[in-house]
Amino acid sequence: MNEKQQPDLPSVAGLASASLVDAVGRLYSHRAHIMGLVSPRPDLVLFGPAVTISFLPYRQDLEDVNGPAFADWFYRAVGSNPQGKVLVMTHGGYPDASHGGGTKLSRVRNNELAGVLTDGRLRDFDQLAEWGFATFCGGEATRWGGDTVTPAAANVPVEIGGVRIVPEDYVFADRAGAVVIPGGSVNEAIAIAREIEREENAALVSIREEDRPSR
């Protein structure tokens, strides 16, 4: 598991996204799960507080907006204490456009973030797999996407897969999907998820021992 546990949080080791989705569902009625993501390392689990970069379609006439490079937006987003955070990036209206690859996102490794979540595409899956952080995205890309989408704002509310994410929400993702946990409820959600898994394990025992109906 690629998990840099945040201070004062219970461990998420061994938990599944489905249990956390159910846990958030016991606390809130809004949608919190994200489906359809892929990963260059699906064996890794992503967990940490969200920092966000919102992408928008590229405009050639707005060079003052397009001007700052990705590095500038990255450091605006992660701030002075980047360790363990999850970089969340929107697709900006073009889900098939690339948001970066192994070179650009080596900053995630260098600054010890937990990983990346985006509904856009990323390049260089083989290289991203080597970096060791968890990455979940809309798919692999081949073409550079800087003339299609561009970063436009850092640490603002964003939408990924029909779910609203605000900075300091907690993001958990595994090979089955992702869940967004409100920051103020993360301890409670993890505790509920543990209870849900205990209930399901007890149900497995009960089902194994149940009497079969006579024919």
Image (spheres, rainbow, N blue to C red):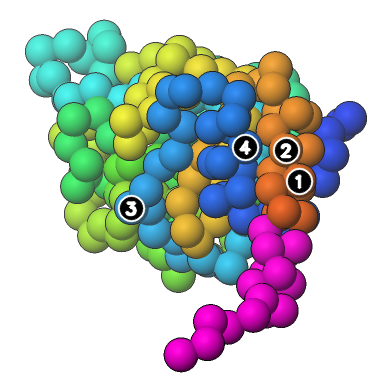
Instruction: Examine the image and state in which quarter residue 145 appears.
Output: top left
Q: Is residue 20 left or right of residue 81?
A: left
Q: Residue 192 shows which numbered tag?
A: 2
Q: CA distance from mark 2 to mark 1?
A: 5 Å
Q: Amino acid at mark 2?
A: Ile
Q: Residue 23 shows which numbered tag?
A: 4
Q: Earlier in the sequence, mark 4 or mark 1?
A: 4
Classify mark 4: helix, strand or loop: helix
Q: Earlier in the sequence, mark 2 or mark 3?
A: 3
Q: CA distance from mark 4 to mark 3?
A: 20 Å
Which residue is painted at 33% across and 36% down in the image?
A: 161
Q: CA distance from mark 3 to mark 1?
A: 27 Å
Give the image location of residue 19, x and y in percent: 61, 48
Residue segment shown in magenta: 200-215
Q: Is the stretch drawn in magenta largely helix, strand or loop?
A: helix
Q: Is residue 15 left or right of residue 40?
A: right
Q: Are marks 2 and 1 in contact (CB under 8 Å)?
A: yes
Q: Residue 169 shows which numbered tag?
A: none
Q: Amino acid at mark 3?
A: Gly
Q: Amino acid at mark 1?
A: Glu
Q: Residue 195 shows which numbered tag?
A: 1
Q: CA distance from mark 2 to mark 3?
A: 25 Å
* Membership of 208 in magenta stretch: yes
Q: Is residue 65 left or right of residue 29?
A: left
Quadrant of the drawing holding the N terminus: bottom right
Q: Are marks 4 and 1 in contact (CB under 8 Å)?
A: no
Question: As displayed, is residue 102 above or below residue 162?
Answer: below
Residue placed furthest toward the bottom: 215
Give the image location of residue 131, x and y in percent: 60, 60
Image depth: mark 2 or mark 3 in front: 2
Residue placed furthest toward the front: 215
